[in-house]
Amino acid sequence: MSLTAQPNAAVPAPHAEKRAAAFSSVLAAFGITLLKLITGLLTGSLGMLSEAAHSGIDLIAAAITLLSVNVSDRPADEDHNYGHGKIESLSAFVETGLMLISSIWIVYESLHRILGRTHLALVMSPWPIVVLLLSIAVDYTRSRNLHRVAVAYASEALEADAVHFGTDIWSSFAVLLGLSAAYAGERFHIPGLELADPIAALVVSLIILKVCYALASKTIDNLLDATPPETRKQIRRQLIHDLLAIPGVISVDRLRTRRSGATYFADLTLGIPRNVTFQRSEQITMAATAAVQLLYPGADVVVHSVPTASLAESVHDRIRAVAARANLSIHDVSVQQYDGHLHVEQHLEVDETLPLRQAHDLVTKLEADMRLEVPAISTILTHIESEPATILHPAVLEHDRQLERRLRTAARAYPKILDIHDVLVTHMPSHGSDRIQVNCHCTLPDDLPMSEVHDIITALEGSFKLENPEVARLLIHPEPATDNRR
């Protein structure tokens, strides 16, 4: 599977919907910002100008969100192995800085007017009220739309914008109250109400600072690869519980999660029995990956397995584990107990070209490691066997072909044997000698009773082994004629 995007590939539906939501948010922010700015300049309202500044920040934030959405959905490539999801966190970080600057400016201007008792020259007009009500309606609509798309596609940037624009509703409402109070003070000649407008501006700045703090905390956590809040408590406990429920998982030694854009990354270290096969280890890994992706669909999961001694291990398992750790092959392991001590006998296969001195040193170290693993072991008797070369010589191959011909000749003495096929001759070393075993398939009539089948096979085995005493075992698998013709 290629990691690079196909240049002519169609735009995926999720990306198109996310981009459409972000683009509509940019258009709405531009229109509202322009209306608030014009209204604030015409009326002289600091609250309205602060709202215009706030909406200007929203416009910049919406534009950054649109850019980040276009980039973040790009697939991983050679330069960005973990994808481009971090661009959403980076855009949120820039947005936080802009919000902080606007808040400081609004606080400064508000305090200057409140403490300096600057006379406010407000122009009475219904337009600020209309603009603010329109702004509340637009912010409510786009906040819901952004939240819906963000939840559907797990977009961090769109969710941040949805929360941000949701708070704009309350800030616009605060300015609306401030303007109403200021107009009332102007009309009824109540000087104290003139402070309502800068106080409303302060309320707006506090709302911006609150959103700024929450957004900054989340952004910094994402940039520093902090554990996502949704995985820190209940879900983390649930995930550990699900992992430990997988047959073969002894312990969860480490569980690390992080988020980049809409993608979760999980890094697991699991203790699994050290005597399981490689195939079983792979099955456990796949089950652990499925358990994580059940809670985090599409998560990128890396599983590290640590061979671990389990309580269910027998003495034989622990002995074989020591040999496996040393990459040695042992068989025919027997353990006996006398007077409270264990006595072990085992067979060890070594390369046939290995000198005796090196083989002895290898056995000495192996036995020492086994005593450390199982202190109850008193004595160990190791039979050293040479592992023969796996490539047969031409003379051996010719002998095997002769055995196959002799088997077919011997089968002709039994008319009900229709044919002999799939003949396999194997050589198994045993105590310095070559033990030969012959396997074959034998075709017989469909309606032949099993008692007669057994008699024919037994007779063929006896006659063949009598003429070929070097064959230790002949295994015959009977098949019906109809099966053989399939």
Image (spheres, rainbow, N blue to C red):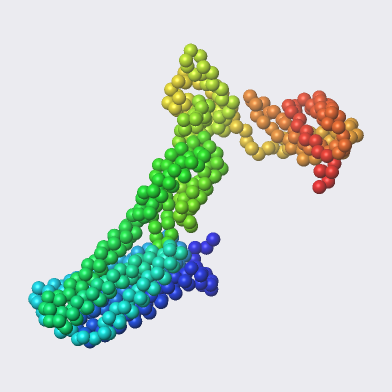
Outermost right residue: 415
Q: Which residue lies furthest to the top in this view?
A: 339
Question: Can the viewer see residue 191 in this picture?
Answer: yes
Describe residue 258's horizontal placement relative to residue 330 as left or right.
Answer: left
| Image vertical order of residue 360 relative to residue 50, above or below | above
Q: How many marks can you see?
A: 0
Please name the residue shown 15% across and 81% down the image.
188
Q: Nearer the viewer, residue 410 or 485?
A: 485
Q: Quadrant of residue 73?
A: bottom left
Residue at (30, 68) in percent of width and height: 167
Q: Is residue 92 left or right of residue 334?
A: left
Residue 245 picture location, percent across and down: 48, 41
> In the rendered image of this protein, does residue 329 appear above or below residue 254?
above
Residue 45 picture location, percent across and down? 20, 81
Task: Write the residue at 52% across / 35% down.
Answer: 275
On screen, residue 92 above or below 451: below
Please name whichever residue, 167 or 19, is drawn nearer the observer in this view of the structure: 167
- Report the front residue among 125 and 159: 125
Q: Position of residue 85 (x, y in %)?
A: 40, 63
On the image, the x and y values in percent for residue 127 come to 27, 85
The residue sitting at 40% across, 69% down in the picture is 144
Q: Can residue 95 be seen in this view?
A: no
In this picture, residue 347 sits left or right of residue 104? right
**Residue placed farthest to the front in the image?**
188
Of the pair 201 and 296, the residue shown nearer to us? 201
> Where the N terminus falls, by quadrant?
bottom right
Which image quadrant is residue 453 in? top right
